[in-house]
Amino acid sequence: MHSGKLVFAQLMEYLPLHTFRHCVQRYPSKYPTKTFSHLDQFLCMAFAQLTYRESLRDIETCLRAYQTKLYHLGIRVNVAKSTLADANEQRDCCIYANFAMSLIRIARKLYASDSFAVELEQTVYAPHSTQPRLICA
């Protein structure tokens, strides 16, 4: 049996969580966060993106298949389709847009001088200027 960290958890270790928390504080939400936090929502949606999920039902089914490993993925609660739908509808998308822009900014700093650098200028999410602008004020 494998005893190391899951690949998803290893990837999420590199996220600057202080930046994420700052983005959450910047855009307060009316949606209750007692059990399903903003970070849980982000991790669910990141997992869905990385595993090519196409719908909320597909996301829920995939997460239920990993139910015994959710805690090791970093997701602290069992996720229902309705909970994820409510969070996606009620929470401000600017939180995640600003967090994405900060990640792009970090990647540009890290790989700007490398010859094998990823072309962030041509990505869908990155603006064409050298400094990313915030989508939400």
Image (tube, rainbow, N blue to C red):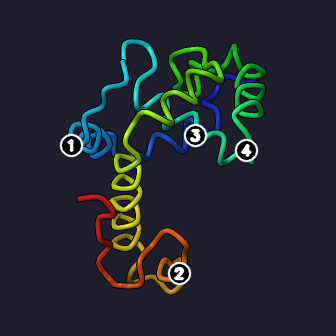
Quadrant where the N terminus is found in the figure:
top right
What is the CA distance from the residue labelled 3 to the residue labelled 2? 24 Å
Q: Is residue 42 left or right of residue 134?
A: right
Q: Amino acid at mark 4?
A: Thr
Q: Is residue 83 left or right of residue 92?
A: right
Q: Nearer the viewer, residue 97 or 73?
A: 97
Residues at discs 3 and 2 in contact (Cβ within 8 Å): no
Q: Amino acid at mark 1?
A: Arg
Residue 75 lies, with reference to residue 45, above or below; the image says above
Residue 71's spot in the image, x, y percent?
Answer: 56, 18
Residue 120's spot in the image, x, y percent?
Answer: 49, 77
Local secondary structure at mark 2: loop
Residues at discs 4 and 2 in contact (Cβ within 8 Å): no
What is the CA distance from the residue labelled 3 to the residue labelled 4? 10 Å
- Earlier in the chain: of badge 3 and badge 4, it is 3
Location of mark 4 (residue): 51
Q: Is residue 88 left or right of residue 131?
A: right
- Earlier in the chain: of badge 3 and badge 1, it is 1
Q: Amino acid at mark 3?
A: Met
- Earlier in the chain: of badge 1 and badge 2, it is 1
Q: Residues within 10 Å of mark 2 (few under 14, many from 20)?
A: few
Which residue is drawn at the image coordinates 66% and 41% (left, top)?
48
Local secondary structure at mark 4: loop
Location of mark 2 (residue): 119
Residue 13 lies, with reference to residue 67, above or below; the image says below
Location of mark 3 (residue): 45
